[in-house]
Amino acid sequence: MPDSSSPARPFTTLFAIAVALATSIPSSVVGQSAGEVSGRKVITFADLQTIRGATGLKLSPDGERIVFQQGGAIWILSTAPGGVPREAATGSHPTWSPTGTALAFYGRSAESNELQVFKYDLLADRREQVTNVKGGVIADRIDWSVEDKLVFSAQVPFDATSDSAARPVPEPASTERGTPLVLRQGSPDGHALAGILAAVSGPRSQVVETVSELFVHDLAAGGTRQLTHDAAGYYSPAWSPDGERIVCASRDGVYEATLYLIDGVTGERTLLVPGLETKKFNPTWSPDGRQVAYIYHSFTDSDIHGAAVVAADGSGTIGEGSGVLSALVEDLAWSADGRSLLVSYTDGVAKPVFKVDVATGETRTVGSAHQAAFTGTLTVSRSGAVAWAEGRGDTPFAMRLLRPGSSEAEEIYDPNPQVRTWALGEQEVVRWKNSRGHDRAGILIKPAGYDSGVRYPLVVSAYSQGTHLNGFQRVTDPGFANQAYASRGYAVFFPGPRLPWMYGAAARSEAESEAIRGADGWDLTVDDVESGVDVLIERGIADPDRLAVMGYSNGGAAVAALITRTSRYRAAVAVAPANLNWVQQALFQDNMSGRWLSTKTFTGIGEELWENPMAYVRGSLVFQMRNVETPVLLAVGDLDHPSFALPTIEAYLALRREGKDVTLLRYPDQRHSFHGRAHQDLRDRIMAFVERHLARQDEAGS
């Protein structure tokens, strides 16, 4: 039986427990599903689903309007005070013309329902389809040149006779029963496990090999032509300021691994940033066309990530580990003067907007003093205005604008006025040290109507570090807690633990990095959570006798680590937990375009599976299920990838074999993300499970 006072956390004193029992919140307050708290509406999951955001923000060249995507439509908003959005078209990925008088966007053809490029003329209020690419286009970045030419991507059938190195074409699986998918040494990557579990509910579909190529549409001449034919796979194209060249990312297997310059007339390509060790994306031209900025992440070392700048003639690169910025960057844009980059990156539990001096690497926050969570595209106008979207503890989404010469960004759009009537829990950033002395930070939502003299049942949402930031906690995916729990009388805690396969990005020093790697990394995961929970108990917020933990995917793995090492939780929920069986995960690694991914880089063990199999067994939580004493609810979709679905079933069978209190929910039509009725059903079952187990002992049977 595991020790409920895990070595990863200090002992809770008997005095604290006695006080907790005397001041615990009555169970009649917890689980309230209707009515009001302090005159405000108790939040439901349905309420959270009414929250609206926006994506694809783009300022007009003069900065006087902003276009964005919301609810399947494209909207235009004046940036003047008091502006009201108006719907411009149905579609996605809008981009401005250089003159700011028209938009290009993706929409559905009325004849074929295929995705095509459309144009909206603002002056004439006219929308028209401008391309008719066979098979449709890709909803990727679309860019408009100064010469009124559009560049975009489309999937075309793979041509084995193209100029690129020949890639094997799969032998298709027939839709008729009895005909196999034939896989040999030279077969394409990623097909070995495709449809394994899906096969129980229907035949496999025929495999069709396609590749993404660049297309150019001339708005003046009215013609569309395929610009590239080399099967390299191109994405995120952007015209140079002079309209002569295109920069884009190119894929190696499933990753954007290189950057190319493409001649806009001939299609001739020049390698701009080589190498397959980092994923490179969002290439963006400087205003003078002399440099390209981009974001990079390492495949094998999560210490390597950031933003880099390369000379457009390929003569040199600043960055890739040193130079412009080393951080977990989400988005970037050039400042209007071309001397700085506007970037958003994760900084503890915040994701603010920074300005980075390209020459010196010096950074400073921009336009907002509070530590909010960035939630939308960074966009800069030629006039120097900067816009973005952010969330805060009390605001799901706010569009903000920093005008030229101003030091503080102003809010120009809040699409969720209904939130002001809800019973929200007050949100705060909690900082503490774990038992190893590592600085940690997490998010706490106090129960709605919080009383500082009362202890509350605590729900720990254990998803991994870097996801739950200081924004409005509304994620409704099963396995995540949110404001709906706080509205019903629970304290909700997001400790953001580090996991063994997150060692690089999570560590601030080599010593911390080493502590996270391999099987021993689970002890650090537990320490990160337990030390934070202890702080909430010591502060008199959490009732130590009514603790629950839940997690989805990475969070489900954290839940499994916790319940195999402590019995302090009265309920545990793990939805589609990740990597419970490291042995299986290593063997499921399929080839990626001739580059077998090293299993040792994934887990941080330092040795391959066949060199030290017991190290992989030690890290596999499915082999530790007999230690569990907590009631467990497991859930997974039958169509999820086998590396999630099969270990979840293994964990259930192991717990059942040992006579543990375990329930497994298998949803036959769901993948890794849940949707539709299954999504609602699982959310409701999780809430009921938590409420049942966190009820007061003296009222649990009532």
Image (cartoon, rainbow, N blue to C red):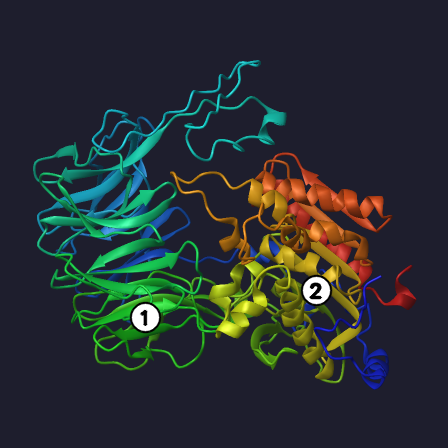
Q: Of circles 1 and 2, which is in front?
A: 1
What secondary structure is found at the residue carrying circle 1? loop
Count neighbours of disc 2 (C-alpha within 10 A) and say few if under 14, some if 14 to 19, many if 20 or more.
few
Q: In terms of image quadrants, where is residue 317? A: bottom left
Q: Earlier in the sequence, mark 1 or mark 2?
A: 2
Q: Quadrant of the C terminus?
A: bottom right
Amino acid type of the residue tagged 2 in the rendering: Gly
Distance from the alpha carbon under mark 1 to that under mark 2: 49 Å
Please name the residue that numbered disc 1 is placed on. 325
Amino acid type of the residue tagged 1 in the rendering: Leu
Q: Nearer the viewer, residue 122 or 624?
A: 624
Q: In terms of image quadrants, where is residue 41? A: bottom right
What secondary structure is found at the residue carrying circle 2? loop
What residue is drawn where x is 36% and y is 28%? 209
Observer able to see residue 486: yes
Answer with left or right where residue 116 lies relative to residue 470: left
Please name the residue that numbered disc 2 is placed on. 35
Is the residue 203 above or below the residue 353 in the image? above
